[in-house]
């Protein structure tokens, strides 16, 4: 096994990282550090969150800094304010014994005047979110002409958040001779485009396999009826008494609703989503980092940049439409050599998603039955007994009180005392599960039906007479498809932006020129009425309830209506 000294790390940095608890380099550090120290070249490093990426680029970046040149020499771009602050803090720790090095985090939500004053005094390394750095460039308060190294950390996340154009603008202000380091957990096509456009003969370093899930993470799933998902969540949380986890939801509203329900039911939980102010976000994240919360209920966007090493469980209350997002979610547990568990609560129509994610992460999911009440109570009880066994007794503080306590309880035997202690702690839980109905798994179709369903999910098409929405849901047609730039996320956002109140969207099927989506039956008239008569540019928007065997003809009709509208617009412009 290599040491940091053998990798070429200078004594000043070695002293700092030793005090931080670094003993031997992690695999990504062993691969990346020598490359950065000995070569000025472009590197693509594919590794999961929590594998030591920050030290892999941070140590050589500090070591290569010319302290006599008080001008930005390295720019590190990251997707969120939280990650920006974390990286800057880590680099400051690594450089404790490197005198006079200046590191500045630059991000939105903080005083830009303060950041400008610090830039004017001179800095060597800038850690920035793209938007704030562009703002400073446009104000001409930062010069990047001496930058020799540009790092994109969590590049796939930045692209998911729509920072592609911002990255283009920043790179246009950096010398062409610079080296570029791209760190990513996954390798989507958008990343490959960046590498072709901006990198020259890059070295690719992969820790594990591309898009692979973290090695120390178990993947489980529980299949329930959609109406039972919250009840299943409570049972799963109760089954793991010492859980310290993140519950991922698909929308802001769902995130807040689930967090509110958990709080009402007595759980240490809070929400993290885009509707919170920065002060509220900081408050919630500090509570979670300090273990004053047991469960953080979050959207994917809000949780970006949250870096906590001892998360025990990730719970997917809804699977993401973009399967690579699952890799990021599950990568937040099983970090720093620890084990973790990623749990997905799904309904029967999401079974196909499990198979697709398994292919992506090269891991197999374990199917589990929702824990029964008696098993949960037993698990909680023995956890409580373990705590009693291991509790540290403060003899000095309680010595003076013990005689009175003994006299008070002397009429009770040992067994009576134990029964009373257990009852005092668990009567509520035992009573709840004694009265609670069991949660049953939905019946799956025959193997032939499952194969046909999986095949239809892969192709995104269904037979015209075999389209049946989930019970209680209606299937709606909309004359917008992939050619319009529609994806599941944008379609859900479009619906909820225009329809008053929350619209839970179920299955979505995207075609070339049109799409189908499922919503609760009682909301179908409201949704259809909302979009009636609406136009997008010159194109009439059509949203209506699907009618099974007539779908292909109607789809074709709406396509030609849209096409004629486009031709009319083009003709008018020529006139």
Image (cartoon, grey):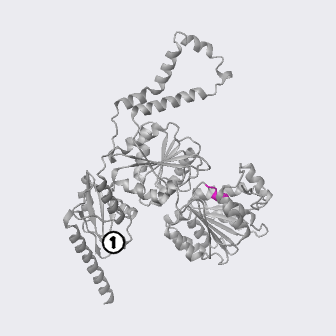
Q: Is residue 55 left or right of residue 493?
A: right
**For residue 131, above or below residue 404:** below
Q: Which range of residues does the magenta coloring cover?
A: 51-55
Judging depth in this view, the residue of 351 and 236 nearest the camera is 351
Quadrant including the C terminus: bottom left
Judging depth in this view, the residue of 345 and 515 nearest the camera is 345
**For residue 73, above or below residue 445:** below
Q: Element at badge 1? A: loop
- What's the residue at 59%, 46% (across, down)? 338
Give the tally of numbered discs. Answer: 1
Quarter assignment of residue 35: bottom right
Q: Would you say the magenta stretch is mainly helix, strand or loop?
A: helix
Judging depth in this view, the residue of 28 and 513 nearest the camera is 28
- Rendered location of residue 567, percent (x, y): 29, 83
Quarter assignment of residue 404: top right
The question of residue 54 being in magenta is answered with yes
Q: Is residue 89 left or right of residue 319?
A: right
- Rendered location of residue 195, percent (x, y): 57, 73
- Rendered location of residue 1, percent (x, y): 71, 55
Which residue position is annotated with label 1? 512
- Rendered location of residue 399, percent (x, y): 66, 18
The question of residue 406 being in magenta is answered with no
Quarter assignment of residue 464: bottom left
Residue that sits furthest to the bottom in the current view: 575
Q: Can residue 85 be seen in this view?
A: yes
- What's the residue at 30%, 87% (across, down)? 571
């Amino acid at each position: 096994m290599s040491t940091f000294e053998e990798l070429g790390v200078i004594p000043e940095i070695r002293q700092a990282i030793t005090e931080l608890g670094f003993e031997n380099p992690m695999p990504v550090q062993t691969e990346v550090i020598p490359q950065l120290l000995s070569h000025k070249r472009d590197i693509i490093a594919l590794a999961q969150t929590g594998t030591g990426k920050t030290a892999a680029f941070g140590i050589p970046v500090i070591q290569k800094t010319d302290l006599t040149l008080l001008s930005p020499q390295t720019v590190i771009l990251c997707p969120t304010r939280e990650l920006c602050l974390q990286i800057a803090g880590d680099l400051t720790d690594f450089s404790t014994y490197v005198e006079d090095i200046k590191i500045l985090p630059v991000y939105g939500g903080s005083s830009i005047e303060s950041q400008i004053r610090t830039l004017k005094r001179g800095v060597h390394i800038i850690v920035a979110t793209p938007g704030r750095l562009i703002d400073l460039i446009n104000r001409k308060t930062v010069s990047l002409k001496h930058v020799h190294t540009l790092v994109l950390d969590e590049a796939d996340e930045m692209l998911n958040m729509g920072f592609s154009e911002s990255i283009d603008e920043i790179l246009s202000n950096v010398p062409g001779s610079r080296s570029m380091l791209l760190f990513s957990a996954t390798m989507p096509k958008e990343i490959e485009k960046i590498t072709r456009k901006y990198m020259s003969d890059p070295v690719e370093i992969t820790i594990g396999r591309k898009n692979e899930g973290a090695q120390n993470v178990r993947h489980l799933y529980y299949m329930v009826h959609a109406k039972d998902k919250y009840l299943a969540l409570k049972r799963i949380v109760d089954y793991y008494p010492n859980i310290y986890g993140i519950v991922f939801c698909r929308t802001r509203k769902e995130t807040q609703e689930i967090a509110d329900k958990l709080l009402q039911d007595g759980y240490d939980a809070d929400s993290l989503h885009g509707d919170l102010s920065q002060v509220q976000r900081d408050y919630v994240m500090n509570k979670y980092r300090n273990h004053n919360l047991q469960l953080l209920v979050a959207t994917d966007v809000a949780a970006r940049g949250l870096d906590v090493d001892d998360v025990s469980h990730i719970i997917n209350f809804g699977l993401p439409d973009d399967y690579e997002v699952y890799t990021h979610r599950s990568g937040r547990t099983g970090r720093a050599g620890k084990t973790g568990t990623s749990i997905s609560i799904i309904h029967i129509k999401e079974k196909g998603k499990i198979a697709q994610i398994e292919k992506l992460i090269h891991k197999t999911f374990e199917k589990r039955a929702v824990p029964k009440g008696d098993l949960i109570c037993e698990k909680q009880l023995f956890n409580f007994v373990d705590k009693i066994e291991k509790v540290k007794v403060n003899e000095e503080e309680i010595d003076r009180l013990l005689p009175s306590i003994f006299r008070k309880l002397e009429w009770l035997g040992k067994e009576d005392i134990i029964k009373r202690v257990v009852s005092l702690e668990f009567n509520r839980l035992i009573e709840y599960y004694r009265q609670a109905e069991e949660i049953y798994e939905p019946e799956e179709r025959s193997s032939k039906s499952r194969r046909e369903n999986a095949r239809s999910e892969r192709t995104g098409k269904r037979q015209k007479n075999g389209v049946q929405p989930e019970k209680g849901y209606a299937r709606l047609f909309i004359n917008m498809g992939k050619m319009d730039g529609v994806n599941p996320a944008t379609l859900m956002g479009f619906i909820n932006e225009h329809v008053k109140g929350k619209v839970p969207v179920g299955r979505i099927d995207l075609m070339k020129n049109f799409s189908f989506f499922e919503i609760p039956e009682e909301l179908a008239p409201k949704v259809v009425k909302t979009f009636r008569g609406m136009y997008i540019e010159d194109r009439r928007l059509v949203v209506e309830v699907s009618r099974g065997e007539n779908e292909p003809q109607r789809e074709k009709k709406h396509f030609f209506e849209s096409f004629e509208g486009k031709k009319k617009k083009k003709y008018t412009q020529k006139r």
